[in-house]
Image (cartoon, grey):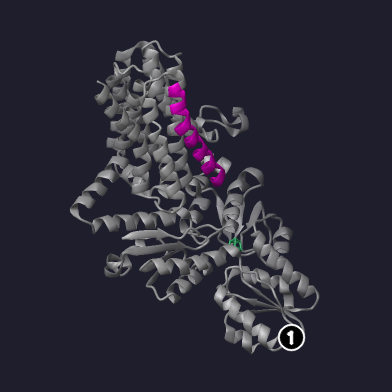
Amino acid sequence: MKIVVARMSGFCMGVRRAVEMILDTPERHPGPICTFGPLIHNPQVLELLASRNIRTLEEVPDRGEGTVLIRAHGVPPEIKRRLKESGFHVIDATCPRVVRVQSIIRRHARRHHAVIILGDPDHPEVAGLLGYAGERGVVVSTLAELERLPPFPEAILVAQTTQNTALFLEAVAWVARRHPHYKVYRTICDSTERRQEEVKRLAGAVDALIVVGGKSSGNTRRLFEIARATGKPAFHIEDERELEGLDAGLLARSRAIGITAGASTPNWVIRKVILALEHAVFRRKSPGHKVLYAFMRAALLTNAYVSLGAAGLCYAASLLQGVPEGAGAWMGVAYLYTQSMHILNHLTGSRADRFNEPDRARFYEERKVPLTAAALACGAGGLCLAFLQGGLPFLLLLAMSLLGLSYRLAVLPPGLAPGGIRRLQDIPGSKTVLIALAWGMVAALLPAIAGGRAYSPAAVLAFAWTAALVFVRTAFFDLLDMQGDRLVGKETIPILLGERRTRRMLQAILALLIAGLPTATALMGLPAIGYLLALSPAAMLAVLVAWERGAVLPGVRLEFLVESHILLAGGIALLWGWITA
Ligand code: SF4
C-alpha cells in the first residue's frame, strides 16, 4: 500500500503565525498570558500551553490582568474593546486574510449595505465577522437559507475564509441571477481553496482518503465532506489511535491511501498517522518485509545504525588522509562515543520527542535504566579506547563528553546569564553545530592528533567534510521536527532561518560537498577515494529532493535513508580499503 500525503496538509499561514506569536509572548509581554478561546483544536498543544502557564479564556472578565492573545479567527470589535477596557494588554493574532474580510464588512456596513456571510453560524470567525457587520449582518450556511432571505436594496456577499468553495460558487451564481446588484467578494482563503482542490485531485489517485484533524475544526470537517463527495471511502480521524476503528479490510485492500489534514492540525499528528499506517503496511507484508522493517526500526531506536555511520565516516576520513593504520581503534571510539551521546540526548530530550518522535519517546521512557547504563558503558568504553591511543586525544574526548553531558545543565545563575543564556542548549542552533563539530572531531581530528597530523591540510579537509555531512543530516531532522521543537521552546537552525531558507542552505552545502571534495582531491593530490565519497552527499541530496516532492514521507524509511547516506561513506571506504589492500 502506498501512502500519499497532500502537500497542503497541516498548519496554514494564519494558524502558524498565531502559534508563533503566543510562543513569543511570554518573553515580550506582561504575564499572566492567555488566549481568548482555544488557540487551536489540538489537546496536546493546549496541554503544552497550559504547562507554560498559558491559559484559555472563554469569557471577558470584569477585571483582566496580563496579556491576552486573540487567535487567528479574530473576534468582534466589541470583544476586543472589552478585553482592553478590562485591563488586558491585547495582542491581535487575527489572520491577515480574516482581517481583510473584516475590513470589507466594516466598510460596507458603514455605507448601510446588508452583509450576507456564507458560513457556519457557530464558528468563532463568523461570530467575529458578524460583529463588524452590526445589525446589518446575516449568516447563511446553505443555499436554501440564502434563497429565503428578503431582498436588500444594497448588499454584499462574503464567505467564511474556510468555506466550501463549491457551495460559495453556487451562492455566487444564484446572486448573479436573482440580485445582480449585490456585490460579491471572494473571501475564501487561497490556502483553503488549494487544500480543497488538492483533496479532489488526490482522490483520483488513491483508493481511500483519511482526513486528519479536530472533530470540532470547521475547515477539517469541510475537507472531510469534500473527500466524501469524491465518492472514495473517506475517514475523519483526530489522531493515529482512531486508525484502529477504521475498516481494516478496506485499508488492507487499498493500493494507495491519501492523507490530508486541516489547517489547525500540527504536523506531528500527521506524522504519527503516517507512522502508524507505515507500521500497518509492513505488518501485512511478506515475512521478509516485516523482518526488514523491524530491523530498520530497532537499528534506529537503539542508535546502532547512526553509530555505525560514525564509525564508517571515521574510516572514510582516515582513507581520505591516506593513513588507514590504526583506524580500527578510532572507529571503535567513534561508534561508542556516538552511541553514548545519542542515547543520553534522547533520554534527556524526550519532551520534544513526545511530539516529534512518539515511538522513540516511548522506547526511551520505558527503558530508562538499561539505556542509561548502556550510555555510560559506551561512554566509558570510548574513553578507555581513546586513552590507549594517546593522552591528548583522551583528554579532548573527555572534554567533549563532559560538554555533551552538560549541554542541558544550567551553569550560570539567572541574574548573570547574558541574554538569558544559562546553558549551552539556550544558544540558538547550538545542538546542530555542536553535533557536527563533535562528529568531525571524533571521526577525523582525534585520529589525526594522535598521529601528529592535526595541521595537515588533508586532516582539516576530512574534518570539514565530515562535520558538513553531519550538519546537513542533523539540520534535516530539525526541519522535520520544527513544529514540535518550536512548541517546547527549542531554537533550532530551521526555526531561526525558516524552513525554505534552511532547505536552500542544505542543498547548497550538499552541492558544495559534491563538487568540493573531488576538486580538493585533484588539487591536493589526495587518495582517489575522494572522488567516490562525493556519492554520499549526492545520495543525501536525492533524499532531500524526494522528501520535498513528497516521494518519501516522514517515518522509519525516511530516517533510515538519511542515516544510510552517512553509512554509504563507510561502505565506500570499506570497499576501497579492500580493493586497494
Ligand atoms: S485558513 Fe486562511 S484565513 Fe484562515 S487562518 Fe488559515 S490562512 Fe488565515
Residue 431 appears in view? no
What x and y, as percent, mark residue 489? Answer: 52, 43
What x and y, as percent, mark residue 99? Answer: 69, 63
Residue 226 lies in magenta, yes or no? no
**Quadrant housing the N terminus:** bottom left
Q: Secondary structure at mark 1?
A: loop
Number of numbered discs overlaid on the protein picture: 1
Residue 311 appears in view? yes
Residue at the left extreme, as displayed: 287
Residue 506 lies in magenta, yes or no? yes
Point out the quarter of the image occupied by ligand 1.
bottom right
**Quadrant housing the C terminus:** top left
Q: Which residue is mark 1?
A: 152
* Image-quadrant location for residue 58: bottom right
User: 178 above or below 128?
Assistant: below
* Image-quadrant location for residue 79: bottom right
Q: Residue at x 24, y 56 (%)?
A: 283
Task: Report the side of 142 relative to 464 (left or right).
Answer: right
* Image-quadrant location for residue 403: top left
User: 573 above or below 25?
Assistant: above
**Residue toward you, 34 or 117:** 117
Q: Residue at x 30, y 20 (%)?
A: 327
What x and y, as percent, mark residue 542? Answer: 42, 44
What x and y, as percent, mark residue 211? Answer: 43, 66
* Magenta span of residues: 499-522
Residue at the right extreme, as displayed: 111
**Main secondary structure found in the magenta portion:** helix
User: 441 above or below 475?
Assistant: above
What amino acid is found at the position of numbered circle 1 in the picture?
A: Phe
Q: Is mark 1 within 8 Å of ligand 1?
A: no
